[in-house]
Image (cartoon, rainbow, N blue to C red):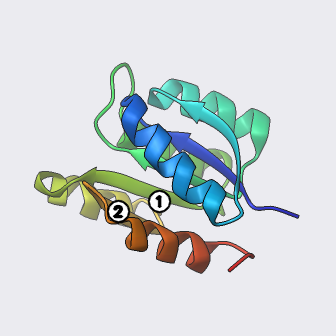
Amino acid sequence: MKNRLLIVDDALIMRLRIREVAVSCGWNVVGEAVNGQQAIELFQELKPDLVTMDIVMPELDGVAALRAIRELDSKAKICMVSAINQRDKLLECIRLGAIDFIVKPFDKSRLISLLEKHGAIS
């Protein structure tokens, strides 16, 4: 069975890039969200195996969404995606239970490595 991925980013181009790499690695992208509130709702509905979560988004940011999802499911696998200048936020996310992070603009091989590490398919 394919691994199930939820992509959360307010930038369409980032969602498309992550989707492209994930699909090429055998992942099934089950949903996409443009803000933290949508991420929480889709996480509850879709129960993905992994979530890629942008930090800076409108309405509800990735830190708040991470916190809420981890309250719903303490075993949720959430990988944060952010610009290098968000280092303090990334560290906060790791403390809150994020399993990994990718720095934008991300290197394709880094995303492939992350998907292989956190999925059942390599």
Q: Please name the residue shown 41% across and 59% down the image.
A: 96
Q: Position of residue 27 (x, y in %)?
A: 70, 59
Q: Please name the residue shown 62% across and 61% down the image.
A: 24
Residue extending farthest to the top is 59
Q: Quadrant of residue 121?
A: bottom right
Which residue is the site of mark 1? Answer: 79
Which residue is the site of mark 2? Answer: 102
Can you say which quadrant of the picture contains the C terminus? bottom right
Q: Position of residue 58 (x, y in %)?
A: 33, 22
Side (left or right) of 81 relative to 71: left
What separation in Å lies between label 1 and label 2 (alpha carbons)? 7 Å
The number of callouts visible is 2
Residue extending farthest to the left is 85
The amino acid on which the numbered mark 1 sits, given as a three-letter code, is: Cys
Q: Position of residue 16 (x, y in %)?
A: 48, 40
Can I make out residue 76 in this image?
no
Label 2 packing within 10 angstroms: few (<14), some (14-19), many (20+): many
Q: Please name the residue shown 39% across and 41% down the image.
A: 14
